Amino acid sequence: MKRYLAANWKMFKTTGEARETAKDVVENLETRLPDDQEIILFPPFTALQSVFEVVKDISWIQLGAQNFYPAEQGAFTGEISPDMLIDAGCKYAIIGHSERRHIFQESNDFVADKVHLGLKKDLAIILCIGETLEEREEGLLEKTLKAQLDPVLNNLAPSDIKNRLLVAYEPVWAIGTGKVAQKEDILEAHNLVRSTLKKFLGQEGENIPILYGGSVKPENSSEILPLDNVNGVLVGGASLDANTFSEIIIKAL
Ligand code: PGA
């Protein structure tokens, strides 16, 4: 399976800053990245166009958006549709990020609606799931991950996926906190996700990449990326600097 290295720039970077960071990532990696690895940059909406200009002719780097609204079009002031993102050059979208679930109260069902529409539209979706510290401490890891995965996987046929669904396990307590999950925690959660995917999708469940996210840095990427069932990383804070993001990748080659 390919390795996926995703940079989530959240609500950071103007159009010019995003363009420069994307150019630096390309320059750092173009002669060093093996064929079986894919970089995905997720700038804010306003910078999609400027980053697209940098990456459009390069096969190993793709553009993605951090969110969309689950409707084709309509009176949804302030929202953006999958077709608009595709028109802007996006191949990917992040759906269900913990900041959307917790700050904007997105429910598991609402997240599932987005995943289903995105896949129908041929966007590749990185579905983020993960437990809070409270849920972990109460022994609710499995229950929480299942509650987040089930509404997405219910009513989804293996043929709907066509290599366009990825899952990112991001423990909420490790996002932006500097606290990285222990190897055992990552293995346990990724194995749980893999077995749930297989339960719903059979053999196709084996082919869905599972990314880890939460305080990934150059100091820990070479420990995380080789783990079983870890098929890539979703990087927030440490992806804002092109050299740091590139180092995360290079250190784990
Ligand atoms: P972080 O964020 O790397 O800053 O912890 C990860 C994410 O939010 O996807």
Image: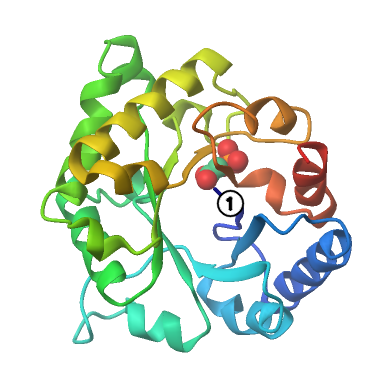
Residue at 75 percent of width and 69 percent of height? 22
Residue at 66 percent of width and 55 percent of height? 36
Residue corresponding to mark 1: 2
Whether residue 182 is visible here, answered yes or no, is: no
Please indicate whether residue 197 sits to the left or right of residue 181 in the image.
left
- Quarter-wise, where is residue 119 in the image? bottom left
Q: Which quadrant is home to the C terminus?
A: top right
The colour scheme used to paint the residues is rainbow
Q: Compared to 164, does 128 lie above or below?
A: above
> In this view of the protein, which residue sits in the foreground, 81 or 117?
117
Pointer 1: residues within 10 angstroms few (<14), some, or many (20+)? few
> Helix, strand, or loop for circle 1?
loop
> In this view of the protein, which residue sits in the foreground, 166 or 177?
166
The x, y position of residue 174, in whole percent, is 52, 28
The x, y position of residue 189, in whole percent, is 40, 24
Q: Compared to 210, does 26 lie above or below?
A: below
Residue at 70 percent of width and 84 percent of height? 57
Q: Compared to 240, does 176 lie above or below?
A: above
Please indicate whether residue 31 sits to the left or right of residue 148 in the image.
right
Whether residue 202 is visible here, answered yes or no, is: yes
The x, y position of residue 111, in whole percent, is 24, 54
Instruction: Report the amino acid beneath label 1.
Output: Lys
Q: In which quarter of the image is ligand 1?
A: top right
